[in-house]
Image (tube, rainbow, N blue to C red):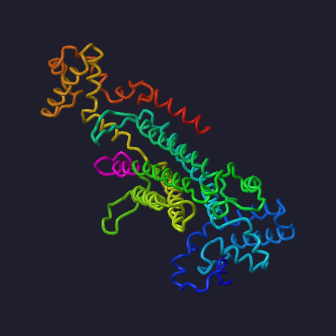
């Protein structure tokens, strides 16, 4: 392959090899090879359609590009640092294959709009896969929630026992987070589905191109209306990294709880051996390493978002070489998200809840204190007064090592004569959960409604 720069006409001195290596992006942007060939095919067909190139030249270039694409898929293409980036490498390879006519491919096009188009195509091709993986995980959560509507567990605030809840309700909370994640990625598609090609370097072109034709060839729904914006915009990538960061945040929170739930102190969950590892020194260990890895990878994705924000914050219009730094973080985030979602889905799908352990945890605490306060409020005691009464009973229980439901009726009535024998029914944890019928609450009927709505949303 020729090492003469395709842009080097006005240059008299060549850079040192290490400078070339520093400036080259082929080590990572070769991941855009498919998209680069796809964009070039659409561009040259447009050049033929508008009579900018004659049909013979177009056919020769199209055949050459299609041959390169076939070789790419067979793993036969080899790229060099000397040709800097994926665009120059493909053009150089095309020149080797079909001769000087390959040079006509770049008519009415710049690497600036070319790389922006490739980048849009890259995300456009991968966002549906991410959305599909989120949907798969949502379906798993709905299925598990359906099986655990009446499984009772402690609900927490400040990591302290707060009120008993349905485990199904807990799982559906993460379903809702993922629903918002999916909505964000779908909106991200709107700004990704915009074509920069035709903006050329920054100002458009004097050639009579047809951008609508090219957009249709590439399947873009929109075309950038401003050439300066087209070559310099990376909002779609920032949106992707932001959305990815929020998604990883949700997975990380879930993984943090899984890591606690499987510990000896909680024992709420048992993970499959397929998603855990052992210790090289402690034979008894069963570590939730997959959950910890996903939790750890969230920081990696956050870093990519911060890096691109910092890269973009001071860039004047239009294109700047800084934008070479926009891709690696996105590539790595795609490679982080997809396996994280897949592994998480398998891990939670095969996890077994310890139903009895969860239930017992709601009976050896004071998480039913609110039930007693509500009970008194329903009998006409002002809630603030009821709150104080129950607080005194909790203090007494701590001192006497008794839970509220274990106290005698006489002791309860000493605190308030409004308390009657029916209070013991209300103090049962499963009753406390079942009675919460407010819209979106943890009551069994409400959880079932959440699940049915989710099934409709998922098309199940």
Q: Is residue 139 visible?
A: no
Nearer to me, 36 or 201? 201
Q: Is residue 267 magenta?
A: yes
Q: Which residues are magenta?
A: 254-269
Residue 75 x/y as whole percent: 67, 74
Nearer to me, 432 or 131? 131
Write down the quadrant of residue 126 in the picture. Answer: bottom right
| Rendered residue at 49%/48% (across/down) | 349
Q: Is residue 435 magenta?
A: no
User: Looking at the rendering, in which quadrant would you find the N terminus?
Assistant: bottom right
Q: Is residue 32 left or right of residue 208?
A: left
Q: Is residue 74 above or below residue 311?
A: below
Q: Is residue 70 above or below residue 220?
A: below
| Rendered residue at 87%/70% (across/down) | 56
Q: Is residue 363 left or right of residue 213?
A: left
Q: Is residue 394 visible?
A: yes
Circle count: 0
Q: Residue furthest left?
A: 399
| Rendered residue at 46%/26% (across/down) | 445
Q: Is residue 76 left or right of residue 407?
A: right
Q: Is residue 240 left or right of residue 264?
A: right
Residue 55 x/y as whole percent: 87, 66
Residue 460 x/y as whole percent: 61, 38
Residue 100 x/y as whole percent: 78, 79
Nearer to me, 158 or 330? 330
């Amino acid at each position: 392959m020729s090492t003469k720069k395709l842009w080097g006409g006005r240059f008299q001195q060549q850079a040192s090899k290490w400078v070339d290596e520093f400036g080259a992006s082929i080590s990572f942007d070769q991941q855009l090879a498919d998209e680069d060939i796809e964009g070039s095919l659409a561009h040259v067909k447009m050049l033929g359609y508008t009579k900018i190139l004659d049909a013979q030249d177009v056919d020769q270039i199209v055949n050459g590009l299609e041959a390169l694409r076939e070789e790419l898929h067979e793993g036969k293409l080899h790229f060099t640092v000397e040709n800097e980036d994926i665009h120059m490498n493909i053009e150089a390879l095309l020149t080797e294959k079909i001769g000087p006519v390959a040079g006509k491919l770049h008519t009415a096009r710049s690497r600036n709009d070319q790389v922006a188009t490739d980048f849009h195509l890259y995300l456009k091709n991968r966002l549906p896969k991410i959305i599909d993986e989120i949907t798969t995980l949502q379906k798993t959560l709905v299925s598990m929630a359906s099986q655990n509507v009446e499984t009772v567990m402690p609900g927490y605030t400040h990591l302290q026992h707060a009120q008993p809840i349905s485990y199904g309700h807990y799982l559906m909370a993460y379903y809702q987070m993922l629903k918002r994640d999916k909505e964000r990625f779908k909106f991200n598609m709107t700004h990704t589905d915009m074509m920069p090609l035709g903006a050329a370097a920054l100002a458009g072109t004097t050639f009579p191109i047809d951008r609508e034709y090219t957009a249709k060839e590439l399947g873009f729904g929109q075309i950038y209306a401003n050439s300066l914006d087209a070559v310099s915009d990376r909002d779609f990538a920032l949106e992707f990294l932001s959305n990815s960061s929020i998604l990883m945040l949700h997975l990380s929170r879930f993984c943090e709880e899984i890591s606690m739930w499987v510990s000896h102190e909680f024992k709420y969950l048992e993970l499959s051996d397929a998603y855990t590892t052992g210790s090289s020194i402690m034979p008894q260990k069963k570590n939730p390493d997959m959950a910890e890895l996903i939790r750890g990878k969230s920081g990696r994705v956050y870093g990519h978002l911060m890096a691109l924000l910092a890269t973009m914050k001071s860039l004047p219009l239009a294109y700047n070489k800084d934008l070479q730094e926009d891709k690696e973080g996105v590539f790595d985030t795609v490679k982080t998200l997809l396996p994280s979602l897949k592994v998480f889905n398998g891990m939670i799908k095969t996890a077994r809840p310890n139903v009895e352990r969860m239930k017992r945890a709601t009976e050896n605490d004071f998480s039913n204190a609110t039930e007693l306060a509500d009970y008194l409020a329903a009998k006409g005691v002002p809630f603030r007064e009821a709150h104080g009464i129950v607080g005194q009973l909790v203090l007494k229980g701590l001192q006497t090592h008794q839970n509220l439901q274990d106290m005698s009726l006489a002791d309860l009535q000493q605190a308030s004569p409004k308390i009657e024998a029916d209070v013991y029914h209300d103090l049962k944890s499963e009753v406390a959960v079942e009675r919460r019928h407010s819209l979106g609450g943890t009551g069994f009927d409400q959880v079932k409604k959440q699940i049915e709505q989710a099934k409709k949303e998922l098309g199940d």
